[in-house]
Amino acid sequence: MSPADEYAGRLGVWESRASRLQALQSRLGSARLLLAAVAVVIAWESLHGHVLSPLWLSAPIAGFVGAVIYHAGVRRDRARAERAAAFYRSGLARIQDRWAGGGRQGERFAEAEHPYAADLDLFGTGGLFELLCAARTRMGEEALARWLLTPASLGEIRERHACLADLRDRLDLREDLAVLGDDENVGVQPRSLLAWAESANVLDRPWIRWAARLLPLASLLAAATWAVLGLLEPFLAVVLAEVAVLYLLKARLGEVLVSTESAFEDLKMFAGLLARVESEPFEVAEMRALVRALASGERSAARCMGRLSTLAALAESRQNPVVSWFFSVPLLYSVQVGLAAERWRRAHGAKVRTWAEVAGRFEALSSIAQYSFEHPDDPLPDLEEGAPPRFRALSLGHPLIPPARCVRNDVDLSGRARVLLVSGSNMSGKSTLLRAVGVNAVLAMAGAPVRARSLTLTPLQVGASIRINDSLSEGRSRFYVEITRLRQLYELAGAAPRLLFLLDEVLQGTNSMDRRIGAEAIVRALLEREAIGLVSTHDLALTEMHGLGEGRLRNVHFEDEVRDGRITFDFTLRDGVVAKSNGLELMRSIGLKV
């Protein structure tokens, strides 16, 4: 069964279930109203008619309470069914290329100075991150973004490939994770979680522990003395002592409990995620090792986080008037909860960073596995060791372009040629080719499948100069911004992994002579540092670069054709230098008199 058929079948099941539960929920609402009306009638009759005993009220009241409890369960089941249906609708949208703007776009990870993030559309609406991301936590989002922004080592990539083989077809697992929590919003703030877990205890004085044990017991004994003997003074003395303790500890309790409330709003969902991962019978050693890291002594991470979630709920309940009036002073409620939170932090706080990292890694792997499941024709790349650097792709396409419109091309930088100089007219596909090469290299170095029939490469660091704009606020021209980026790429070259450079319309912000001399010098310098790459241009003077070494530059091009006054493109890469330009034709096509 194809992924689309699998998703469509499951979507139908969940939509049908949600519809049935909605109808049941409506009937339960009517039943509750009916039971309430019956209770009112019986109460009226028992008070005024004296025919029915007030004991008859127990039946409709019990029925009403049961209906309320059952109704709450039905609401939860319906919400789960609707979230599961939304999960499969989103999956179908991705498969059918209707996904742009509907997922998490990761704008906060965009870095203006990053060597390729903006050039390759990693973040934002319709970006690569949005296509891939299936994370439910901030940790998962951050791990996936980090993988896209930084090339992994060869050993790490192979570990990810092994994990993907195990995760790819676990659709039930991904469904269960997608419906966790009360809504589909991303929860769990890792920075506040870690800041709290790794902070020093502030309620560690022995007198605080003794006061928390003895004063509540003393208040109960004093209350009993008051009730039996009528002596109020002992009770008032204990209460005054408890008020003094609360006053002395006010700042410390605020530091512990307020941060607990704010940091752990979605801990129940996080605990559920950990529990579901821990219960999955993974097959490969790499995934089993990941699960083994989710422990603290003899206790699982899920149980520990569930306990912390309960403590967070207890801390929040301090705002309840009943708790505030009847438990705060006699039982030192805030102190008891604060000490429990401190005990948890002392026992498990050092493990939280590991748990957060494991959860983030798992969600990043699950995101890539989901992409692999939904795009079964996209293979994993072959990563090779050794020098020189190389990149060889057959039928390479751009993963952000719908397959119906995506024209694929072969790209070979595995032989003597170290740089492809791509010439062609405007709109012919030069920039798209550079982006396709770059995005697939990023996917390969993140351990993900690629959009190609096959891709073989050595470890590479992508560096791009494609989307270059001036900055009015910083007073920098486009040319200055471009040469700053080129300097950045030059510094990346020579280090490991080797640089794959992508230069679109290089140095177009200066005159033709400076452009030719500068472009040749830049490419020569990059090649001397064992970099490989693509350079696009519509300036044919750049196709005759000298001093690069025999056969190190290979000219390729895109063509266009004018038919009935309209320019058409086939976006097919060909050998050699382009023989014509369409600049004048484009100007004429929009009505300019040239």
Image (cartoon, rainbow, N blue to C red):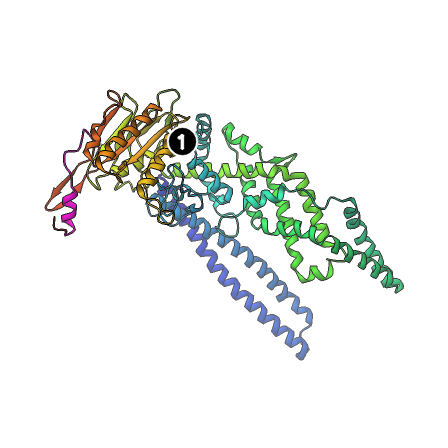
Q: Quarter-wise, where is residue 494 in the image?
A: top left
- In the image, is residue 578 part of the stretch drawn in magenta? yes
Near-viewer residue (300 or 447)? 447
Q: Quarter-wise, where is residue 303 in the image?
A: top right
Position of the N terminus by quadrant: top left
Residue placed under numbered mark 1 in the picture: 445
The amino acid at mark 1 is Met
| Residue 449 appearing in the image | no
| Residue 511 appearing in the image | yes
Question: Which residue occupies 20% across, 33% down?
Answer: 557
In the picture provided, is 232 more to the left or to the right than 322?
right
Query: Secondary structure under badge 1?
Result: helix
Near-viewer residue (333 or 28)? 333
What range is drawn magenta here? 574-591
Q: Residue furthest right?
A: 229
- In the image, is residue 385 part of the stretch drawn in magenta? no
Q: Position of residue 11 (x, y in %)?
A: 40, 48
Q: Residues within 10 Å of mark 1 (few under 14, many from 20)?
A: many
* Count of marks overlaid on the render: 1
